[in-house]
Amino acid sequence: MDLGKAFLEESRRYLGREYAVKIRLCLEQLSDDDLWWRPNEGSNSIGNLLLHLAGNIRQWIVSGVGGAPDARRRQAEFDERGPLPRAELLERFTTALSDADRVLGTLDPAVLAQDRKIQGRDTNVFHAIYHVIEHFGMHTGQIMYITKLRTGRDLGFYRDAGGLAIEDWRKRGGV
């Protein structure tokens, strides 16, 4: 087994078929107002988190790994109070994911150890991708939690089967 190739395939799966699907399923349950709701000024809305995830994946994968120009304005992701139209918000998010998937899908595993400087940090390609996966997972969990707060319902992503968690989100998300 080629571990580098497996790492890239698994990274693409998490971003495009696990996190993105769960986020989309959350957004389907929310109103436009819910997307920009925040419990207090020290917290982010789902809209901010989507802008932040798009900015992060562009900076770290599309630019840092793939070599595209970096035009990120990180603070603007958090300063936005919206509401940006839902379609525009989703377009930014899905386009960033598609661009990152293209980079990861064409990346030669032999470059995983190559050095990069991203967001002013010395890193390498492997660590850049690993950072994005971890970061995406954390914010996906926040989006799921905010969705539960706003809807008052369990998301139904998993069901118990004799102590095993069965992934029902896959059927609902078309995966």
Image: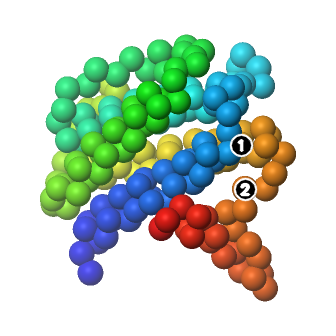
Give the distance between the C-alpha atoms of the residues marked 2 and 1, in whole angstroms. Answer: 8 Å
Task: Specify the quadrant of the image occupied by residue 70.
Answer: top left
Answer left or right for 113 relative to 141.
left
Q: What's the residue type where badge 2 is placed?
A: Leu
Residue 84 shown left or right of residue 109 in the figure:
right
Query: Which numbered dot is residue 155?
Result: 2
Quadrant in the picture for residue 166: bottom right
Tell me which residue sits at (58%, 19%) in the image: 83
Residue toward you, 116 or 172? 172
The numbered disc on residue 147 is 1
Q: Residues within 10 Å of mark 1 (few under 14, many from 20)?
A: many
Q: Which amino acid does the dot numbered 1 rest on? A: Thr
Residue at the outermost bottom position: 162
Can residue 49 be seen? Answer: yes
Mark 1 residue element = helix
Image coordinates of residue 38 in percent, x first then y, are: 72, 25
Q: Which of 74 and 121 is in front in this view?
A: 74
Image point (64%, 70%), residue name: 168
Provide the secondary structure element on which disc 2 rests.
loop
Percent position (x, y) of residue 15?
A: 43, 53
Residue 11 visible? The answer is: no
| Disc 2 to disc 1: CB gap under 8 Å | yes
Q: Earlier in the sequence, mark 2 or mark 1?
A: 1
Residue situated in front as seen by the camera: 87 or 49: 87
